[in-house]
Image (cartoon, rainbow, N blue to C red):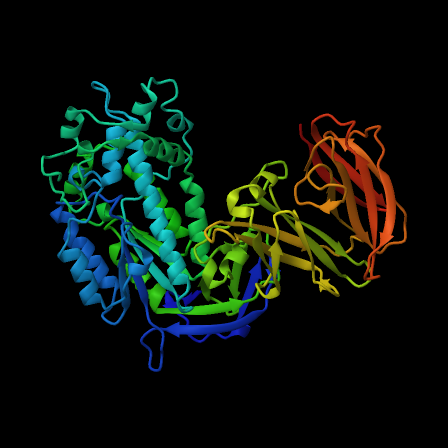
Amino acid sequence: MYASRDGQSVDDLQASDVELLEDGVPQTIDALEHVQVGAPGSTRARVFVIFLDTYNTQIEGSSTMRLPLIKVLDRIIAADDMVAVMTPEMSPSEMTFGRKATVISNIMQNDWAWTRRGRTERRDQKDALYDACYPAVGSNANTPANEMKARRREKLTLDALDGVVTDLGSLRDERKAILTVSDGWVVFRENQELAAAQKGRDQGSLVDRLLRRPSKEKSDETGGSKDGAKDGGSKDGSAKDAGSKDVNYVECEADRVALARLDDSQRLRSMTEEANRSNISFYAIDPRGITTDPASAADKSAGRRDTTTNAASRQDSLRFIADNTDGLLIANTSNLDAQISRVVEDVSSYYLLTYSSSNPKLDGRFRAITVRVKREGVKVRARRGYRGRTADELVSSTATPGAAGKTMAPTTPANARTPFRIRTSTWVSEDTRQGAFWVVGELDYQTRRQLAWTAGAEAEVVVLDARGQEVMTRTVDLKSDEGPFSIQVPETGAIAAGEYAVRVRIRSQADEKAELTDTARVVLREGAALGEAVMWRRGLSTGPRYMRTADPRYTRSDRLKLELATDAPTPAKARILDRNSNELSVPAQVSERTDASGAFKWVVVDATLAPFAAGDYLIEVTQGREKRVTEFKVVP
């Protein structure tokens, strides 16, 4: 947060002077600290990462741009600041923080020709592979390879920026700045034409489709030479001759389909949201706009060939990440001094305001922040807001060290087949406003028969509340012949109404690399005396017994049972509906049983599925004014 009056910073605000609202709701401020880097007794430091976007910057050989960029960085970064350099070709673990003189001098002066965009002599192996797989036909140079290379480079750049944001998020609370030097990005979206580019084309025999050797002419075009190196390349792998080897066409096809599905607009939004959570701001520097010789830069730009977008739309992507993280885009010389002063002020003197949101929902929605100062004439600039966490993100952020880097499985659609899934069912007492929920985990039947899972598995169940505090951790041994597993949270007693996140990770006993994960958001709502349904199944896969299930798909030979927890005395009734909510003539039998704890009873609904055709159905259970609807599917 920045406070000023008549253009001068205000440095003596107290928490009582500030009013904070989230989505219009007043919040309690936990702490307000004025950070002034370089002040006597201050232990805070300014932290910068210079991100050189090697894949999307085209300024090599431009003497008019080199010096201005160095000068801008020199004016922003002070001698005692902590600074690191990052590129898309590095891992975040390779970032090393040092002092300004060493870091900037090394990267900017010793190796100025660090850009790749538009440079044919610095292609990597993937570029050469795509050119070999999709050669130009006649005078038509518009092949899938061109867009694939552009999409892959943009993906690698955003992957690296995501890694930088994650790494900086683990540092101290002070503001961190990412100085992003780039021409900007196309911001690719899904392209169905690229995904279907090869359909209908004659790819020759199966052998040719799987393993194709480029022609000699194509090898010459890609810069091959007898000693295995390209012009400007080397024999160590930085620029190998793709034409000298057989090319795996299957790899090209897999990459083409995957790259065609990219949605980088969503990636940019997610990245800025994570940056806001970690007090990180992007200060984007478009090197084309800071030259003192605009005519020269314009001449060079006019000669570039860019078939996907123009400079203005690329610059919009830089402006997006800057504006949404309270940063700034530096892209012209007309107000360069003011822009540099703004960056220096942003990271040198500011307020750190901390609060705990009164909104505990794990819904992933944007939450707008409004900051006001009660003093007359004082203006405030602060971040616009942030996106609340989802259950997946909550359990990911608190994962054990052994789980670092694992990808969380998305919530599984009810009717989709998946190797492993979990299902949760909740209940809250109307009297005590406390309750419990049940977690059922299930390996798909075909997955259980795979060799890696026949020896059994171990399930690790982690439950967190909306604040990220651990509610329960439990390990369950799974035997391949036992089917699903089920646990109650908490195992005894009750927990308060609210939101919780559940992660279940199962590991094979036979193959330590075989691992499956699913997560769920659980909401225990007050005022609902009738709980959500726990699903049971009896059929060929279970034998003569009923077993709890996480899979809502049933066959006609199965028998379906639902159990809904309640402490209300009112009798319940049930009916079966089609997908359009029309009642069917097939009856549902309703009974009750008391739970072993004695704290509540179960409403039991039993249905025979033999009369049903394949399709989607609903079971509606009503108890007084309460109603619960459970979806299920009959499959062939």
Query: Where residue 538 appears, x then y in whole percent?
Result: 75, 40
Q: Quadrant of residue 240?
A: top left
Quadrant position of the C terminus in the picture:
top right
Q: Nearer the viewer, residue 390 or 346?
A: 390
Task: Identify the residue shown where x is 60% and y is 41%.
Answer: 444
Residue 228 vs 384, above or below: the answer is: above
Q: Is residue 382 visible?
A: no
In this view, the residue in front, 611 or 557, is 557
The mark tally for this picture is: 0
The x and y percentages for residue 551 are 66, 41
In the image shown, does 517 or 109 lie closer to the viewer?
517
Q: Is residue 360 shown left or right of residue 353?
A: right
- The image quadrant of residue 262 is top left
- Residue at 57% x, 63% y is 468
**Near-viewer residue (518 or 350):** 518
Is 311 left, or right, of 393 in this rendering? left
Looking at the picture, how far across and down is residue 176, in whole percent? 36, 63
Horizontally, residue 473 falls left or right of residue 87, namely right
Q: Would you place residue 616 above or below residue 498 in this image?
A: above
Question: Looking at the picture, how far across and down is residue 368, in whole percent?
Answer: 54, 54
Residue 176 makes an appearance in the image: yes
Q: Quadrant of the N terminus?
A: bottom left
> Is 480 on the left or on the right of 303, as rendered?
right
State the image quarter where residue 231 is shown. top left
- When the figure is inspected, residue 178 is found, relative to residue 214, above or below; the finding is below
Q: Residue furthest left?
A: 226
